[in-house]
Image (cartoon, rainbow, N blue to C red):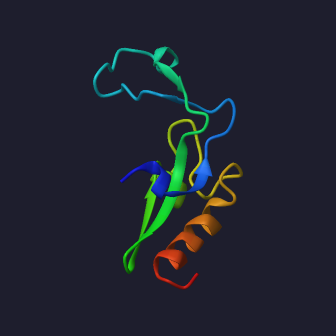
Amino acid sequence: MASRELRPLLVYGPQSRVWAELKETLPELPRAEYPVFEIEGWLAAAAREIGNGRLLVLGETVMCTAAQDDNGLPGMNTEAGSHNALFCFNAVRWLGGVL
């Protein structure tokens, strides 16, 4: 399936970065030295209808949890993730055909 068949829901904006998680493979490497990649324009969430069904693709599912990591980065119960619960609620409603 080509990405042009997906409807973008969340797109990473300017200055968006991600680092390679190397804790398991290189436990002695400090996190500050992990490689960092620019991801501006990448899809964080996308959807499409397929026949009678619907598909939702999330690049990161922590936004639909109340999880926090060692740095307190967001799940849905943080200030930075304050809109995540509504997004996830509406995503489930769309998948179920309510929206």
Return the residue nearer the eye: 79 or 58: 58
The spot of residue 59 in percent (x, y) is 46, 48
Residue 1 visible from this viewpoint: yes
Q: How many marks?
A: 0
Residue sitting at the far left: 25
Left or right for 63, reference 30: right
Quadrant of the snapshot with the N terminus? bottom left
The spot of residue 88 in percent (x, y) is 55, 66
Q: Residue at x 62, y 58 (%)?
A: 77
Residue 66 visible from this viewpoint: no
Quadrant of the snapshot with the C terminus? bottom right
Q: Residue at x 45, y 49 (%)?
A: 3
User: Compared with residue 88, is residue 13 higher up or lower down, i.e. above or below?
Assistant: above
The spot of residue 73 in percent (x, y) is 58, 42
> Image quadrant of residue 63?
bottom right
The spot of residue 28 in percent (x, y) is 35, 15
Q: Residue at x 42, y 27 (%)?
A: 20
> Image quadrant of residue 29?
top left
User: Compared with residue 4, is residue 15 higher up or lower down, i.e. above or below?
Assistant: above
Q: Residue at x 28, y 23 (%)?
A: 25
Residue sitting at the far bottom: 98
